[in-house]
Amino acid sequence: MASVKLTKVKKIYDNKVVAVHDFDLDIQDKEFVVFVGPSGCGKSTTLRMIAGLEEISEGTVEIDGVVVNDLQPKDRDIAMVFQNYALYPHMTVYDNIAFSLRLRKMPEDLIYEKVTNAAEILGITEYLMRKPRALSGGQRQRVAIGRAMVRESKVFLMDEPLSNLDAKLRNQMRAEIILLRQKMDTTFIYVTHDQTEAMTLADRIVIMKDGYIMQVGTPAECFDMPANLFVAEFIGAPKMNIIKTELLKENGKYYVTPFDTKIEVTGEKGAELARRGVESGPVLLGVRPEHITLCREGEGIPTILEVNEMMGSELHLHVYVQPKEEGEEDQGEAKEPAPVDPASCLIVRVPTIGLTADQRKNMAYGAPLNITFEGKVMHFFDPETEKNLLL
Amino acid sequence: MSKQREEAQAVMKRHMGLKASARISNTVIHIVLVLMAIIWLVPFVCIVLQSFRTETNPDGTRVTWMVPYIVPKKWGLDNYVNLFKSDFKDWYLNTFIIALVVAAVQTFIVLCMSYTLSRFRFKLRKGLMQFMLILGMFPGMLTMIILYRVLKDLGLTEAHAVPGLILVYVASSGMGYYVSKGFFDTIPKTLDEAARVDGASRAQVLFKIILPLAKPIVIYTVLTAFMAPWGDFVFARYIAFGDSSGMNAAVGLWKWLTQDMINLRYTMFCAGGVVVAIPVAVLFMCLQKYYVEGVTGGAVKG
């Protein structure tokens, strides 16, 4: 149970590569913070610097107000779960979990109590006398978590703990980590490249790219108000559609003109644009797939369906906007369809519950679909700086 | 249908043909191997047989010199009894002390060195490794004269040769890191990291995590560290001379092969050879299985 404070932390490798740039972050006591980003963004490096496994090139890391830059990992009072479990293969599960307690010279009966207690919480009691190699991936990860749990340390670090598990097990373990968090009541720092994990687990998300922090905020903040284009595309699945278009200001109202269709910006977004006095100009329009709705023929933007992904409760439709029909006389000979402009490809997320059986049947390759954007949940980014215009 | 059967038979025939030729080549290989084994074993068998030879001359004295036959005419343990009544017991003890101390100290140094080179990153690490590799290419004999000089000045020759020899054998042991460093490199570093986060110091990581996982290589290191001084003659002969109390078994036994001694001690020499070979043979028989034992399974998701 402790706060962690990183001030201007920088990591420069021997080959002069800078992995982390001026990382500033205040982590509150008992907070669950998730570092998320694509691989190579420096999230693991930052975590390892907090753990003491990686040297801190510049800046300071404080745990509970104490600068720990020069402390060995063993003196930082942290626990860590590794992506590849890192169980000691020559020890039984019991000995694995008891290892840190034995190093602390804890009496054997107390160790027994703690180990069996942790094993019970994690449901691995029956495997205590087995060696790690006789366990499945999920069981191994439970042991690894148990090993970190019994330490009752100030900070609990997890480095992509679920990425070696299969999808089903990953969902199950994710839920268990949420439960575990309730029971442990300590400070968590969790590294992942999976935005779903980040969204579901975190109190606060730290989104990183190329060693820089892109945004720090609650999952809702990052989702509703992404600070920049990168965050907008990274958070949310399927990813946000980005359309290069114009923002028009007419009579105090704002419009966007994607694919030559004029759509009014309404609601809070419209009001916020007005409050900030944003002028007309080029803009990168961000629309989440779930904020695109189907509409009747002749309305909205005409598109062609390319891929229909059936997700069960919803459909993910990959569509592209019908190109303007120019030179119609050619159509007879040139059957070969022109390559689809990637900028005109959109993903639409449609709940299956609202569709009739006929509609569903018709959603096949090449089917025409008309779509429109929800005016009140659009995102606007500066085409130059890629920053959110409303932040 | 019949065509298929014919084809199948053809395939079977081909297989049988393969089998027959394989059997022939196997037989040839085994004959060669048996011959080689016999050639290799003959000297050893001779020594063992000679060591049990206890014939006497017509005048009652023992026949202790070389004879033109291999199988003894009279068997007995007299040679062994006499052996341990002679100076040999001192030499044997000396050899044991030297080999045990060297095995312990050298193993410790080699394993620490290997772990350091495998896990730590420091300036000139590569340079150090290359330097030691090149240094190791020079034959150790080159250093004999100067080492003798140094040991003599320290008073560690002749009667006090045992500590001197230990010093020499142990001194360069850090250079023998190659095999064990290679093995340590295959143990995932996350195990170290997990242990360090768990509260282990670097030394605890080495002794509680790495070494138990590297058991085969530890045993290999102990064996090689034990074997070299156990069988050393050249250097020991150079340092331990004159005084019988400072000699090891090889040098002592060699003394019995001089012109004036050989006819008196030949059978005892053979017995000495057998006694020297026993511990090494036992060691190898006991520890052989660790060479092949794989231990890292389950450490990391495979």
Image: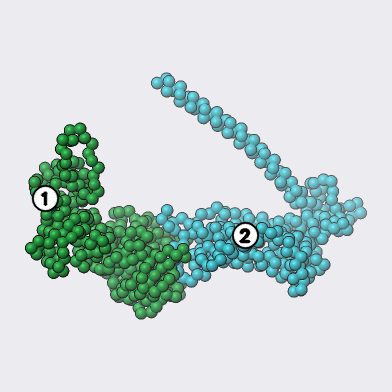
Seen in the picture, residue A339 relative to B170 is either above or below; the reply is: above
Question: Do badges 2 and 1 share one subunit?
Answer: no
Q: Which residue corresponds to mark 1?
A: A300
Q: CA distance from mark 2 to mark 1?
A: 75 Å
Q: Are marks 2 and 1 in contact (CB under 8 Å)?
A: no
Q: Nearer the viewer, residue B94 or B203?
A: B203
Q: Position of residue A186 (x, y in %)?
A: 31, 72
Residue ranking furthest to the right: B59
Residue at the (24%, 68%) spot, across then down = A218
Residue B149, image quadrant: bottom right
Seen in the picture, residue A252 relative to A292 is either above or below; the reply is: below
Chain letter behind tag 1: A
How crowded pointer 2 is (Cα within 10 Å; few <14, some 14-19, many 20+) is rated as some
Q: Position of residue B89 (x, y in %)?
A: 76, 65
Apparent colour of chain A = green
Residue B133 shows which numbered tag?
A: 2
Q: Position of residue B20 (x, y in %)?
A: 57, 30
Apparent colour of chain B = cyan
Seen in the picture, residue B39 relative to A258 is either above or below; the reply is: above
Q: Nearer the viewer, mark 2 or mark 1?
A: 1
Residue at the (66%, 67%) spot, across then down = B171
Using residue B167 as the reference point, say whether residue A25 is left or right of it: left
Chain letter behind tag 2: B
Q: Amino acid at mark 2?
A: Leu
Residue B296 appears anywhere in the view: yes
Q: Position of residue B134 (x, y in %)?
A: 64, 59
